Amino acid sequence: MSLPNCLQCQSEYVYEDGLMLICPMCSFEWPADQTDALEDADTLKVLDSNGTQLQDGDTVTVIKDLKVKGAPKDIKQGTRVKNIRLVEGDHNIDCKIDGFGAMKLKSEFVKKL
């Protein structure tokens, strides 16, 4: 039976001690029977306005006009945003929009193509 990589540092040197799995590289310990649940909790799940899960590198479309503080114009509905990055926080999409530059968006205002 092969053991999973460490959930914290991804080390392959995990060993089993009773009911616990232990990583000697970072000293992270977790119950062996909860590995799948912990891996699911560690992954960032971001949904678009239609409920489709987004991933890093996806292309999305803005679904409504967005006002940008300090910018002379709005981001128009239908604007395509390529190669997004998902981040933690209220504005959970980090991207670069042509004509605006680097920007953070809320996933509720975009849909996946």
Image: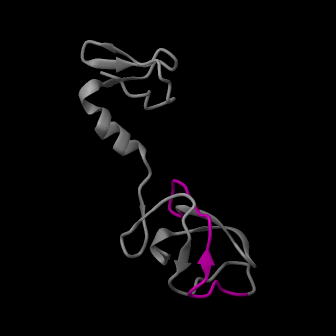
Q: Quadrant of residue 32?
A: top left
- Tell me the colour scheme of the image: one colour
Q: Residue furthest front?
A: 1
Residue occupying the point 42% across, 47% down: 43
Residue occupying the point 28% across, 25% down: 31
Q: Which residues are magenta?
A: 73-91
Is 88 inside the magenta-drawn segment?
yes
Magenta highlight: main SS: loop
Q: Quadrant of residue 50?
A: bottom left
Residue 42 pos. (x, y %): 41, 42
* Number of numbered labels in the structure image: 0
Residue occupying the point 38% across, 68% down: 52
Above or below — where is 40 with respect to 31? below
Is 23 inside the magenta-drawn segment?
no
From the viewer's perspective, tell me whether residue 80 is left or right of residue 70: left
Residue occupying the point 64% across, 83% down: 75
Residue 10 pos. (x, y %): 49, 30
From the viewer's perspective, tell me whether residue 63 is left or right of residue 36: right
12 vs 48, nearest the viewer = 12
Above or below — where is 60 with respect to 13? below
Residue 77 pos. (x, y %): 56, 87
From the viewer's perspective, tell me whether residue 47 is left or right of residue 72: left
Quarter of the image where the N terminus is located: top left
